[in-house]
Amino acid sequence: MSLLEVEGLRVRLPTARGLTTVVDGVDYRVERGEVFGVAGESGSGKTMSMLALLGLLPEGAAVEGSVLFGGRDLLRLARSRLREVSGRDIGMVFQDPLTSLHPMLSVGRQLTEHVRLHLGLDRRAAQRRATELLEEVRLPDPESAVRAYPHQFSGGMRQRIAIAIALACRPKLLIADEPTTALDVTVQAGILRLLDRLRRENDLSVVLITHDLGVMSSIADRVSIFYAGRVVESGPREAVLRQPRHPYTRALLDALPHPEGPPEQRLVAIAGAPPSPGSIPPGCAFHPRCPYAVETCRRDVPPLLAVNGRALACPVDPFTVP
Amino acid sequence: MTELAVRLRGRRRFVRPTWRQPLALTGVAIACLWIVIAVFAPLIAPHDPLAQTFTPAQPPSLSHLFGTDELGRDVFSRVVYGARISPPIALLLVGLAAIIGGVLGGVAGYFRGVVDGALMRVVDLFFAFPAIILAMVVAAVLGRGLRNAALAIVVVAWPSYARVVRGLVLSVGDSEFVQSARLLGAPARRALFRDVLPNVAGPVFVLATLDLANAILLLSGLSFLGLGAQPPQAEWGSMVATGTQYFQWWWMGTFPGLAIFSVVLAFNFLGDSLRDVFDPQTAWRSEETEP
Amino acid sequence: MSALELDDIVVEYDRRDSGRIRAVAGASISVARGQIVGLVGESGCGKSSLARAAVGLVKPAGGTVRFDGNEVTPLRRRARPRELVRLQLVFQNPYSSLNPRRKVGSQLADALVDAGTRRARAARVRELCEVVGLSATAAERYPHEFSGGQRQRIAIARTLAAEPTVLVLDEPLASLDASAQAQLANLLVGLSRELGLGLLLISHDLAIVRHVADVVSVMYLGVIVEQGATRRLWELPLHPYSEALIGAVPHPDGRGFLPEALPGEVPDPGRPPSGCRFHPRCPYAFDRCPREEPPLVPMADGRLAACWLQPEGAEPAPPARLATARSDD
């Protein structure tokens, strides 16, 4: 049984024009001990789908579908129960550690609180665990770090602290939403290596949400590509990124400067921009920008079909088009 | 995340949505009501506000909707005519304070350096005193009377505008679109009038609207203390003052007090809604239209 | 002669509790017409301060900036001198660099007036929109109706009103989607080639700079540590920091390449390390490094490097090889 099974997830958010669909029927699974990448640009629904899992959607949001975590449907749990489960078994790391860490509490306090709440440790044990955790994330000088405050650390270190807090209760799943986007590239490399090591040492599953395919390619085992609230392609990382089948995935990869590719000076840009929720084209959401679009693309939403461990939501296979 | 957040909030069309909100409409309704009452006072008030012809201390009845006061005047008529005094004066003095304070603040923000330092020290000096105390002192020095009370309030009110406008001129002046204009060759003065001031006007307008409420309260307060309107003027504040002396005849002070309350409320509602229209930050949240 | 020349620029600013900080401690860059120069560096390297000094938004504490031979004087209350108007700047944040209250067309017309056109003509405004790939109807709309990528185009169009010869761009692609980044990068290259614009492109994104720039300068903690033709830099980085930067860039090719991390943190610019600023984090540091700061010197092929391992005039070689060679004798 997979650790996390999302089926038919649909999220609608309240706006002035009624409910707008931001996640439109998304399916995926995350196995134990794997890093699952969720890639997409803004408006793709990747963050919202995660927030739905954790019950963090804004007031008035409508959610359908099922999210099975360890056999239990998170969407059907009562708020308090969800908090218990998510607090203990799911850790979350956000993009900006400055706003996700409490500015007025010491680092040690933030760690121990978490640990005492969910694991019931006494103060001494909690302190020890806090220092241990900071060592695990390779924070220099953990003993003094526990007494320091978030603003005294740099961005990269704060992110390590955030990861430590997320892992405090030894969760089975870590959800990281753009964890390195705000960081310098050398610092990002450090965090990626940290995540890679942590998941190997702790048999941890990671859902890595990012718009950066390079980041995904570094540590993800399997990836899924989101566009306009739907999954358009998914599969093993190497297969999807080296031989992308969906026109959007291909276009996205072509638009990226590859550090080892020839440095021609024209990147192949995709015309137009990703649609915002609320103005999603009928049929396949990508069809207005797709060089391979045919008549059916305008009418029918292509279903996500799985073949040989890869899933694809496109009837037109670019490899067969002359 | 920024892009998504911006997109979800939608694109805002300019002035439209705020006027639909219930609070703003209430504020507008009340304000319009009082304008009508003030303009048509002679037609609405059944009696001469100064005429002491009736039986004193009559409770509210059909012939005297708000009763009569200790000197036999019809309270309803006095409240109606009072609409010609407090609100217009408050408007005038807020306008004056905003202009004076705004210009000085703008000068400080534009020239910066020594000029800014000097002007702000003056502003600090004014801020050192609590408003009501300062107003009392000035009014007392100038002498009793409504006009002097109004002047006193202008003296007390202008520093807030100076500070706000200075702050805005400085921050908008440092903003990137102003810097771009300067880089393109615009002299600072053109950038000030074309790019900075229009972005400053909005918040100042909002401040002024909310300040109207304060002004009315201050004016009424001064009259209450005997420094503003003098008897027999039908000014709401002084009516409340007299009313406290004759507590058992509750109608004398209550109705003018309610009038003040309603006008203050109306200006507060208006100011709050205007803030959403003018403030670029909250304007984003005012209403989502086409995403 | 280069269109834009920054010579040994020093930029300082006051920090509340720590006195004066040197954001830029002596940097030199030149940009020729039609040339795209990339400036890369991470947080705290001073590249934004350098950009502002380059156009006159801040006054450098040392060094000179020359544009077409004229000294770039800092902005005062008077209008910027006519001869400097062809040196323009595009800011990083597309959300704050446009006036939220004025229509796009009005802002472009304002730009034309500011830059000295006697009468801003509607035709010219339309032209500016089209040059950057926006439809002419954009002029009637307000900035908030556009996406980040489109706003950057508007910002670029505004600078084009001045018919610039050099454009300084401070992280213009940073807050954009992948689609928008590629489009904008292509636009910039196109403008440079067609209009003969010199570009000083400041970015932390090495991969994009590699695709766009002819020449790259690498900046660390206020100084330039390496400079040279882009292709050569990637093939053979001379400075250990450049090497680390290149190794840290992720590859989106699915091969699972785990980027190289650099130990330590960028030091506080207010308290730079002694000698070579990079030495505490450098894998090849030796005894000279903490003692003396290495100057930026030319190599045999004309590239510049500031590293004690790379002697002046020598043939370029990878730092790793030079370090083992040095420790052998």
Image (cartoon, rainbow, N blue to C red):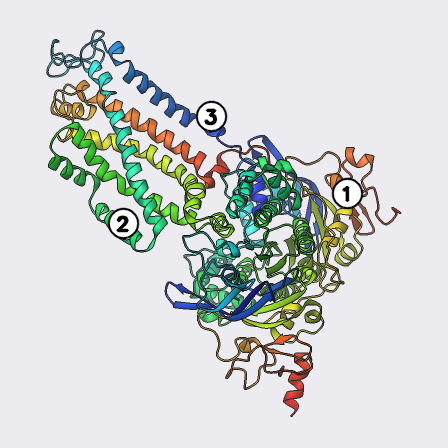
Residue at image mark 1: A290
**Tag in front: 2 or 1:** 2
Q: Is residue A177 above or below residue B12?
A: below
Alpha-carbon neighbours of circle 3 within 10 Å: few (<14), some, or many (≥20)?
few
Residue C171: percent from the left, percent from the top? Answer: 58, 57
For residue A249, side relative to residue A69 (left or right): right
> What's the CA distance linking mark 2 and mark 1?
62 Å
Say what amino acid the circle numbered 1 marks: Cys
Occupied quadrant, residue A204: bottom right
> What's the CA distance linking mark 1 and mark 3?
42 Å
Do circles 2 and 1 both sit on a common chain? no
- Label 1 SS: loop
Farthest-out residue, top: B63
Residue at image mark 3: B20
Q: To which chain does the residue with label 1 belong?
A: A
Q: To which chain does the residue with label 2 belong?
A: B
Residue A282: percent from the left, percent from the top? Answer: 73, 33
Q: Is residue C16 above or below residue B110?
A: below
Find residue B288 and name its label. none
Residue C203: percent from the left, percent from the top? Answer: 60, 60
Q: Quick one: C34 or A113, which is closer to the camera? A: C34
Q: To which chain does the residue with label 3 belong?
A: B
Q: Quick one: A35 or B261, which is closer to the camera? A: B261
Alpha-carbon neighbours of circle 2 within 10 Å: few (<14), some, or many (≥20)?
many
For residue A40, side relative to residue B15 (left or right): right
Say what amino acid the circle numbered 2 marks: Leu
Alpha-carbon neighbours of circle 1 within 10 Å: few (<14), some, or many (≥20)?
some
Find residue B119 and name its label. 2
For residue A242, side relative to residue C138 (left or right): right
